[in-house]
């Protein structure tokens, strides 16, 4: 038997940390549902030929095999071999195709599940990680206004989270492609792939790559870099692009769409979540065809984006129909695990119980159970002390778990309840007493709040 | 690319079916938390040497390997090879050992996650399936009253579910072991393993096995079978066991404990969930040492048990401490997937939206968005129609998704809302109008309710 040590890349949370993750997932779900997104959960495995597309990610796929494989599992062909999904987009595309006849389009769905990638673990990058995805998918067509809708919903969803400030940096593939085409670049696709490296390489290295790999002249490369520096929080980017003197129909369409996204998000942005046009955002993946977005968290720029997504004209296709979509993925683990490790977020206690019912002696367990049942009947989580130790020890039992109240059934049938933080103790009726709302359930506590209330 | 067909043993739910699963999981979580159980989630993988114990299940374990393995993954030794967990007990035991210094004992936890077994798929048996487990674990000791507690909590949790009637069939390993010992059986462990086959083999075959494999005389085998026929819903089983004339200290302890479980559950049993002593329940697994339970669902006896568990004196041990525990696992997939397939349970609609906001024309999308925002601000899930089709088509759009209300912004700035089931339409204010509570969110609908309201 191996000694028990954590597995690198497979982080797990302690109960009080899990409080934070669950509250974040519940909050995201609430917002998504308010906007009509239905939840689905897909199986964790897909046939290898659906996962592996010849890209960089292929070698990070975890394949499954049985310890002792049976007949139908022996087959190691790519359509029989199963692998763990590495995102929630591939399984969603397959789910849409498999169930197309039973779904109503446009289909709004959210999905919050783990995914797996066998990459080198580092802060924000794990081998098992939870993502929260929303997508809207149409059959054969999906009007542009859904791009605005998806962006707004994710802005609202993340605005409700107790995380540091977030910035949505938006661009549009039509804008870039049209600009490069209008500029006369010979290989627009290669140029997009190169410009996407601006967050890793210095500008002059990217300019050289544009010349070497995308066939640009040094002058064209300079204009491409110029475009990539444009970053505005309103539609003023349009004039700055026009000032570069490139004309193209697709560029115009991209400018219009990107303006519409910014205008559409204006009513929902806040001091906490901002949306800006950033013309250097390209996103490497081939399937984006319009709006693209990456999300960054203040103070955690080292994590790179904590979310992203965009418009794809063909999420999936089954020969008869094509399914265009637009979606955004938020990295729940990528965001929360560093915040929990840094103590920026914490759970207010490690157990759901708001009240510990003390045990006077072993014979009176029934009385303590009855008090607990009365509190639970009114949705107050509580637990009964495991043994009839001295009250001081029972209070410390509560303290160690962060349980704020200890309840004392009295020999005469009355009850008293003590707030163990203040020491206040008073007579209480299990049929009517209620803790303050902020004590009822474990809460997410931010670093600032933790400073305010030293324990 | 393979043609898209469902993967045998990996069932997935449509959005309206997922409503049922989510509601069941939320309901279970509510009850567990009211009783002070903290939620945890473990990674899905464990080292193979922690999973494989030489039992039948070993060959059903799914192992992981990377498509292109890196340095540290090449190692195929049992402590480096990773497999998917096949239950939630093995990972929980490892989690307790790994985090023992950071947990407070007794530690109450619930865990609702999928597990994987590469077994032959059949109704109620899947290769990926979700379980809901509760356990209470102590360090070095765990008083017996927690056996009663765990049983009561699971009775309450399942009583709140909209599933057919459930029966908890309880026994006690001390009772069986003490009885066999008092009877003079030479191999008590073998006898327990044999008696556990009573649900698969006829009684006389089991009697023969007791002779062949447990060294029983035919007379002893007959008394063992006699014990196994005892089944009572109150403590009257005690007298029936005593009438068999076997005396043993451990037997007495088992009788006392089993009586205490039945008495302790009496206040929470109902017409929907019953608890009875059934002295033929043994549970094959070696690690149970006291209370054992299996749960059966009325009309679905063919699924065998839909849950089970018991007392184990050593969930885990790290050389310094031993961690005794008591827990019950409920098969969420095993229970729900057959009920959904049979139409016993269904979701009331496929989308969260209670209201579809109609779109008068493409220019008035902002007005419809504003009405939607006003409803959402008061927690009413809604969506805006994707295009300004004729109202009849927009109503059918709502109908196909089961959305009960369609909202019409009027050209004069007032609003009307239509209940599309009754056809009633009336003036409404987006700042104050609220749908009836039962229409606010998708609900679980039982077959009986479905019959009552034909759509």
Image (cartoon, coloured by chain):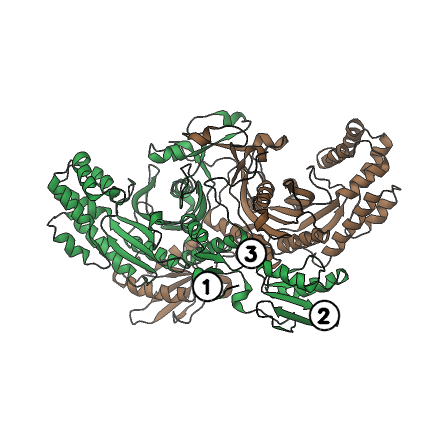
Chain colours: A brown, B green
Would you call the spot at circle 1 few (<14 residues within 10 Å), some (14-19), or many (20 or more)?
few
Residue A301 screen position, x and y as percent:
66, 42
* SS type, badge 2: loop
In the figure, residue A67 lies in which quadrant?
Answer: top left
Q: Is residue A418 visible?
A: yes
Looking at the image, tell me whether mark 3 or mark 1 is earlier in sequence order: 3
**Disc 3 and disc 1 on one polypeptide chain:** yes
Return the residue at label 2. Answer: B410
Looking at the image, tell me whether mark 1 or mark 2 is earlier in sequence order: 2
- Residue B451's label in the rendered image is 1
* SS type, badge 3: loop
Residue A82 screen position, x and y as percent:
51, 34
Residue B152 screen position, x and y as percent:
33, 57
Mark 1 falls within which chain? B
In the displayed structure, would residue B398 be above or below residue B280? below
Looking at the image, tell me whether mark 3 or mark 2 is earlier in sequence order: 3
In the figure, residue B416 lies in which quadrant?
Answer: bottom right
Question: Which residue corresponds to the image point at 59% horizontal and 70% vertical from the top-left?
Answer: B434
Distance Cα–Cα, label 3 vs label 2:
28 Å
- Residue B350's label in the rendered image is 3
Distance Cα–Cα, label 1 vs label 2:
37 Å
Quarter of the figure that contains the N terminus of chain A: top left
Going by the image, does B370 lie left or right of B10?
A: right
Distance Cα–Cα, label 3 vs label 1:
19 Å
């Amino acid at each position: 038997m191996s000694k028990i040590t954590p597995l690198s890349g497979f982080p797990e949370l302690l109960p009080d940390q899990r409080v934070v993750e669950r509250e974040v997932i519940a909050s995201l779900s609430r917002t998504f549902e308010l906007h009509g997104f239905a939840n689905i959960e897909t199986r964790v495995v897909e046939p290898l030929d659906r996962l592996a597309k010849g890209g960089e990610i292929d070698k990070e796929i975890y394949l499954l095999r049985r310890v002792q494989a049976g007949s139908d599992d022996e087959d190691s062909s790519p359509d029989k071999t199963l692998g763990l999904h590495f995102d929630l987009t591939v399984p969603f595309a397959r789910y849409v195709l498999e169930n197309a006849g039973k779904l109503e389009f446009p289909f709004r769905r959210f999905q919050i599940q783990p995914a797996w990638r066998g990459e080198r673990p580092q802060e924000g990058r794990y081998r098992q990680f939870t993502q929260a995805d929303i997508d809207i998918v149409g059959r054969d067509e999906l009007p542009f206004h859904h791009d605005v809708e998806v962006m707004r919903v994710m802005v609202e969803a993340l605005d409700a989270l107790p995380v540091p400030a977030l910035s949505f940096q938006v661009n549009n593939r039509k804008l870039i492609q049209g600009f490069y085409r209008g500029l006369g670049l010979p290989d627009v696709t290669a140029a997009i792939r190169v410009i996407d490296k601006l967050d890793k390489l210095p500008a002059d290295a990217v300019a050289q790559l544009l010349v070497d790999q995308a066939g640009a002249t040094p002058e064209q490369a300079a204009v491409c870099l110029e475009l990539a520096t444009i970053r505005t929080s309103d539609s003023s980017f349009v004039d700055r692009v026009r000032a570069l003197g490139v004309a193209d129909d697709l560029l115009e369409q991209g400018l219009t769409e990107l303006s519409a996204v910014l205008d559409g998000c204006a009513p929902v942005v806040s001091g906490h979540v901002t949306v800006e046009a950033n013309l250097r955002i390209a996103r490497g993946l081939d399937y984006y065809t319009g709006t693209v977005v990456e999300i960054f968290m203040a103070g955690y720029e080292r994590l790179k984006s904590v979310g992203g997504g965009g418009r794809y004209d063909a999420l999936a296709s089954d020969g008869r129909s094509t399914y265009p979509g637009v979606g955004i993925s938020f990295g729940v683990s990528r965001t929360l695990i560093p915040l929990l490790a840094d103590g920026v977020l914490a759970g207010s206690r490690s157990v759901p119980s708001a009240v510990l019912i003390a045990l006077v002696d072993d014979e009176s367990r029934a009385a303590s159970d009855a008090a607990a049942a009365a509190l639970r009947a009114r949705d107050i989580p509580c637990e009964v002390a495991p043994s009839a130790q001295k009250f001081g020890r029972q209070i410390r039992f509560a303290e160690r778990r962060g349980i704020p109240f200890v309840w004392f059934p009295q020999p005469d049938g009355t009850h008293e309840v003590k707030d163990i933080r203040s020491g206040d103790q008073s007579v209480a009726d299990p049929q009517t007493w209620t803790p303050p709302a902020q004590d009822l359930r474990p809460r997410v506590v931010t670093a600032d709040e933790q400073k305010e209330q030293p324990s």
